[in-house]
Image (cartoon, rainbow, N blue to C red):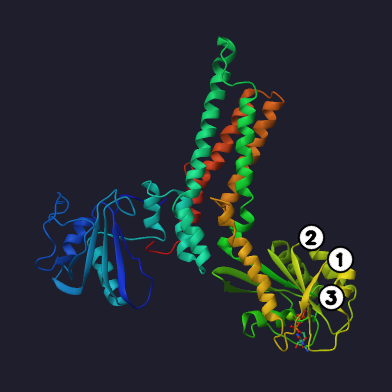
Amino acid sequence: MYPLEDTIVAVSTPPGRGAIGIVRLSGRRAFEMASRVFRPRAGSPPAGDVGTAEMPVAWPVRRVLLGTFVDPAGDEPIDTGFLILFRGPRSFTGEDLAEFHLHGSPPVLRAVVDVLTRLGARPAQPGEFTYRAFIHGKVDLAQAEALNDLIQADALWQARSALHHLQGHLSQTLRAWKEDLIELIARYEAAVDFGEAENMQFFEPGEAERRLDDLIGRIADLLATYRQGRALREGLRVVIVGKPNAGKSSLFNALLREPRAIVTPLPGTTRDFITERLIVDGLAVELVDTAGVRPTPEVVERLGIERTLQQIAEADLVLWVLDGSVPLDAEDDAVYAVIRDKTFRAFRNKGDLPAAWPLEAFTARYGAPLQGSISCETGAGVADVMDVIRAAVRDIQQIWRDHAVVVTNARHEACLRRARKALQRARYGLRTQAPEPIVLEDLRSALRALDEITGETDVEDILGRIFAQFCIGK
Ligand SMILES: Nc1nc2c(ncn2[C@@H]2O[C@H](COP(=O)(O)OP(=O)(O)OP(=O)(O)O)[C@@H](O)[C@H]2O)c(=O)[nH]1
Ligand SMILES: [Mg+2]
């Protein structure tokens, strides 16, 4: 995807001013270029032992060297700071890597990059350092994605689950499964090639089936973690629904503590859904305000309702807002009809006005409990709604108690599904004594699907998509 022969350079700290800024330089000529722009202060560094033909000065690696960065053209100083050298393969990228720690001043950082570019370095593309780490086997593809997730995280639990994958827990689990599968394939191949001719036994009776069932079961268990895992990575989706004018947007604003959505006494005010992100106990929560659902809307409203249905389908938790100041009616029934199969919590709003129906009327009508009465006008009970969200957040966070590995990424989930499907086909083939080459092909395609997660198979197009999401300097 990206060429590997040249030496690449980039500012790795975010754009803008700061106490420090870091420039990374990676590749075959990194040490030699570093030696041309860095003048160690007298007495620093201590005598090193890494002198090579490319790098005339014997500086130590993995030590902080104090000194001055200069433009070698006129020996003009640019800044003072540190240099740290990492000798490949013991570096982030797996190749020689120099890190310049300078003051976080944009013109200084730009000047250092310019000087290194003049010496022959090439400005790095987005994700190119991590791409090199991947190519040199320092991280697999799932870990590279986790690294990007960690950097992009808004909430601590996003970072935490990304770190878990970065540490390789998912990759290790997959590796063990793949070894099992490879062994199964090898023995099955041997059975096909020699079994009948030499009358040799490669499996105990029923053993291949048992092992396949076991593997399918383990993949199914891992896939089952995706409901919570997705919420860890992308945020818990909490969707507010209700009939027009019930006070959905008012609740949305109350939970956000800002007047984000338009509120008016006219039913049908919210025409499209609105999403805002909240952080609740360290977890990202995507809060969604939707267009009110009713049975006979006009055209714009109907399009809005279609979007509401889409949001409901993707919701982890549905908050149903009911208008307590008007009787329950067919519009409420229309809302119930579209959320009955979801996890929902219902609240009677407008508690500051005289109640048009008692709390029990809700249960009598819908056979589900009502959480309580609230008022978005006075703020009464809004904390209870928050508690409901908090409970859902805790449920997601429980995942770590019950599972050592969690799937958080849609791409990984899709690969696991494909692997499971292929194994199920192979299992069916064994049961129905399908021709061996067909069973073998199913086993191999399961292996390829698992390999795709960690990037061990031919995945050029996937690489392009993944690394392009990185920022420059990563
Ligand atoms: N008295 C009282 N009025 C409320 C309360 N909550 C909302 N309202 C009023 O009810 C009307 C509708 O509120 P919205 O928040 O716009 O309702 P909505 O459900 O978003 O309505 P649509 O977007 O039209 O579906 C506004 O006039 C609000 O001021 C409340 O707790 N008490
Ligand atoms: Mg609204």
When the figure is inspected, residue 173 is found, relative to residue 72, above or below; the finding is above
Residue toward you, 107 or 451: 451
Q: Quadrant of the C terminus?
A: bottom left
Q: Which callout, 2 or 3, points to the residue nearer the camera?
A: 2
Amino acid on which disc 3 is placed: Glu
User: Distance between the Cα atoms at labels 1 and 2?
Assistant: 13 Å
Residue toward you, 94 or 28: 94
Amino acid on which disc 2 is placed: Asp
Is residue 137 visible in the rendered image? The answer is yes
Q: Which residue carries the number 2 mark?
A: 341
Is ligand 1 within 8 Å of the beta carbon of the residue shown at mark 1?
Answer: no
In which quadrant of the rendered view does residue 74 lie? Answer: bottom left
Badge 1 marks a residue whose secondary structure is: loop
Q: Quadrant of ligand 1?
A: bottom right
Horizontal side of 73 relative to 306 (left or right) equals left
Image spot of residue 67 (x, y percent) = 17, 69
Q: Are marks 2 and 3 in contact (CB under 8 Å)?
A: no
Q: Which residue carries the number 1 mark?
A: 367
Residue 298 badge: 3
Is residue 409 visible in the rendered image? The answer is no
What residue is shown at x 65% (from left), y 68% (from top)? 391
Q: Earlier in the sequence, mark 1 or mark 2?
A: 2
When the figure is inspected, residue 60 is found, relative to residue 243, above or below; the finding is above
Image spot of residue 197 (x, y percent) = 57, 10
Residue toward you, 468 or 339: 339
- Badge 2 crowding class, 10 Å Cα cut-off, few under 14, some 14 to 19, many 20 or more, is few
Badge 3 marks a residue whose secondary structure is: loop
User: Distance between the Cα atoms at labels 2 and 3?
Assistant: 26 Å
